[in-house]
Image (spheres, grey):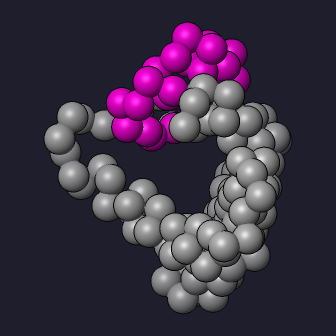
Amino acid sequence: MNTDMVMAALNQAIADRNNPKDVIHHSDRGVQYLSIRYTEKMADSSVIASVGTTGDSYDNALAETVNGLYKTKVIEYLKQQWQGVSEVELATLEWVDWSNKTRIHSTIGYVSPFEFERRYYDSLTESDKVA
């Protein structure tokens, strides 16, 4: 993983959420997340950095689960077919898009994470109108 790859993901997340302000971005202490370009982009976008504690496994439980699913469903399943890094990158982007925008999840009412987040923010907007 390098800064360019995580920059692309950050830019996509910011665009998908219409340039949100004061959201918290949590990551580990990987050099790509602590790079000057990355931290400047977060500051310019009003994204608040939260970096996990070294050796603290609690921060990584969800990320490790998602990474395991990704490796099983994308990398292991399709590994015989890769012709180069660009194909892996495209498959990764497609999987992340599916995972966030289409995949339904029983814990959040059988909707996608993207839909759950949209409903949450819509409910805040409606509450503000009533007040």
For the point 30% across and 50% down, the residue is 59
**Looking at the image, residue 87 lies above or below residue 25:** below
The reply to whether residue 129 is visible in this rendering is no
Between 48 and 36, the residue placed more toward the observer is 36
Q: Can residue 121 be seen in this view?
A: yes
Is 75 in front, or is 52? 75
Residue 37 painted magenta: yes
Which residue is depicted at the point 62% across and 14% down? 37
Image spot of residue 94 (x, y percent): 77, 63
Q: Is residue 62 above or below residue 41?
A: below
Q: Which residue is drawn at 66% across and 36% down?
A: 5
Q: Which of 25 and 28 is in front in this view?
A: 28
Give 117 or 128, whichever is nearer the viewer.
117
65 in magenta: no
Magenta-highlighted residues: 25-48
Residue 12 coordinates in the image, percent (x, y): 77, 42
Which residue lies at the image location 66% right of the left edge and 73% below the top edge?
A: 80
Residue 102 is situated, as x and y percent measured from the top left of the image, at: 75, 76
Figure quadrant of the N terminus: top right
In the picture, measured across the screen, residue 59 lies left or right of residue 49, that is left
